[in-house]
Amino acid sequence: MTIVKANIEQAKKIAEIISESNKAVAKRFDITYENNPKHPSFYTAEWVASDFERGEKYFVAEHDGNFIGCVAFESPEPTLAYLNRLSVLPQYRRMGVGEKLVKHLIDYSNLQGVETVSIGIIAKFTELKNWYIKLGFIEGETKTFSHLPFQVMYLSFTIK
């Protein structure tokens, strides 16, 4: 498996990974298009293209010539980055793909001079929270947003 920087021409493949990878989460937490139309399970190539146009960088995990996972890097300020849309196709989970994508994004963030990498997750997704903590993230605040059918928990990773 290798991790490479993606480009806007790969938006359709990236959107498929994001959407497919998040369908089980949507089902588990009763997320529908009606109550959360921007949820990653509904991601489209147009949304990915818009991400690229806003300056987000995507990295994809490739295996045997196929994209099996992705992660997006967004840096709203020089010392802060967001880890966005970490997605691994279901058949490739529990093989270390997600961990390698996270570590790649942290290494990339470090090279960019970023000091803190932040992520927001569904607060009740305890297994995911614990997975990020195992990778060195620290639990932060939990917020309620009127447009979301769940609370969001923030976690952060400090680059040393």
Image (tube, helix red, strand yellow):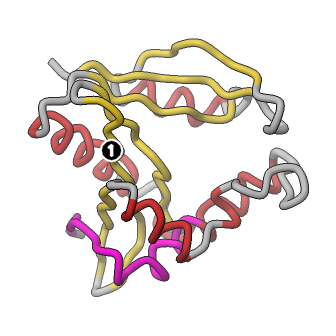
In the orientation shown, which residue stands out farthest toward the left?
111
Q: Position of residue 156 (x, y in %)?
A: 40, 22
Can you say which quadrant of the picture contains the C terminus? top left
Quadrant in which residue 21 is drawn: bottom right
Query: What range is drawn magenta here?
Result: 2-18
Can you say which quadrant of the picture contains the N terminus? bottom left
Q: How many callouts does the rendering have? A: 1
Q: Is residue 156 left or right of residue 149?
A: left
Q: Is residue 8 magenta?
A: yes
- Magenta: main secondary structure equals helix
The residue type indicated by label 1 comes to: Val
Q: Is residue 23 left or right of residue 31?
A: left
Q: Residue at x 77, y 54 (%)?
A: 26
- Above or below for 54 versus 11: above
In the orientation shown, which residue stands out farthest toward the bottom?
65
Query: To which residue does mark 1 refer?
Result: 102
Q: Is residue 16 left or right of residue 74?
A: right
Q: Residue at x 65, y 17 (%)?
A: 142
- Above or below for 102 versus 78: below
Q: Is residue 5 magenta?
A: yes
Quadrant in which residue 14 is drawn: bottom left
Q: Secondary structure at mark 1?
A: helix
| Circle 1 crowding by C-alpha within 10 Å: few under 14, some 14–19, many from 20 | some
Q: Residue at x 28, y 50 (%)?
A: 100
Front residue of 144/89: it is: 144
Front residue of 147/141: it is: 147
Q: Position of residue 49 (x, y in %)?
A: 45, 71
In the orientation shown, which residue stands out farthest toward the front?
53
Quadrant in which residue 137 is drawn: top left
Front residue of 63/5: it is: 5
Q: Residue at x 31, y 67 (%)?
A: 61
Q: Is residue 43 left or right of residue 151?
A: left
